[in-house]
Image (spheres, grey):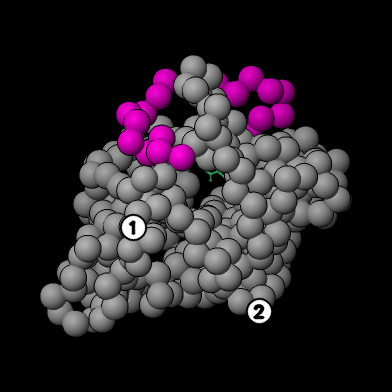
Amino acid sequence: MWHPLNGYLREVGLTAEQRAGWDRDGFFILPGFAERPVLDAMVDRIVELARLLEQPDRRPDLIATPEKVLDGQIDPERRLSKIFRLMRTEPVFRDFATDSRLLPILADLIGPDVACFLSQFIFKNPGALGQPWHQDNYYFRMRPLPQVALWLACSASTLDNGPLWVVPGSHNEAIHDAEPDTREDAGLFYVEITTADTRSEQVVLMDPGDLLVFHSHLRHRSTDNRSDDRRAAMVYHYAHPDSTGPFTFNQDWVDVLRDGVPVTASTDPVPVGASPPG
Ligand SMILES: O=C(O)CCC(=O)C(=O)O
């Protein structure tokens, strides 16, 4: 366990049970972590942003990706797949990313210096496609390990609406080779691990407000949304601020802890492509 030297993080991060889950499985769940008003505020704001992003140049610091299979939908929030780079400028998403209950957990997993480098809202509307088996660090190619994902269920995650599936213990594996996802309407840059054994896969069913914490080498996928309702999630990724790895267009590096002290980073919008780590 990591013990803060400076007294800012008074609580020591993980419980013994969470630590055991992390070490054994590469993930654990914090049930009921977010209250309904927070989830509602996130969804309300994301709908506003989806509509704003329809207008050229209104938010050049954000990136929205389409859900190709839902191209014909009228409302922007029904045809988007993801909106990236929300954490820096959007209070409801930033407040969650820097929640004082989360910082000791992140410090325990990553150390006293932590940055949030990726934040994305995943709409997963009815009919949306899942994301095939992958490891997040396939995309990041980052060191040092671990990078930590927080996956917040903004709606229920059920068998029908495209939940996450994980292979417990696969966080101990190296990064697997992966092939491009060849489905016609596959999401941007989706790849698939086709050669690894997934027989021990487990579905992660979640209630609204549950938070899944997982390692960037954990093999995971999501299935298609076959229900009539949106399966929404807000996802954050954290790493050491001086990590090495390619800087990708959807990243925005925002310090959250330095020497164990919470950082008040600038909330000024940073244009896409202009905030490399370090
Ligand atoms: O939420 C989903 O459907 C997939 C999310 C995922 O696999 C990821 O963010 O890496």
Q: Residue at point 57% right, 40% down? A: 202
Q: Amino acid at mark 2?
A: Pro
- Residue drawn where x is 29% and y is 78% of the image: 11
Quarter the N terminus occupies = bottom left
Compared to residue 38, the image places residue 109 above or below, namely above
Residue 268 within the magenta-colored segment of the rendering:
no
On the image, numbered disc 1 is attached to which residue? 19
Q: Ligand 1 quadrant?
A: top right
Query: Depth-wise, is mark 1 or mark 2 nearer the camera?
Result: 1
Q: Position of residue 274 (x, y in %)?
A: 37, 52
**Residue 240 picture quarter:** bottom left
Marks 1 and 2 sit apart, C-alpha to C-alpha, by 29 Å
Q: Nearer the viewer, residue 243 or 193?
A: 193
Q: Which residues are magenta?
A: 168-190
Cβ of mark 2 under 8 A from ligand 1: no
Residue 178 belongs to magenta span: yes
- Residue 161 tag number: none
Q: Which numbered tag is attached to residue 37?
A: 2
Which residue occupies 62% across, 39% down?
A: 222
Residue 221 lies, with reference to residue 147, above or below; the image says above
Q: Position of residue 53 (x, y in %)?
A: 66, 57
Q: Residues within 10 Å of mark 1 (few under 14, many from 20)?
A: some
Q: Is residue 88 left or right of residue 255?
A: right
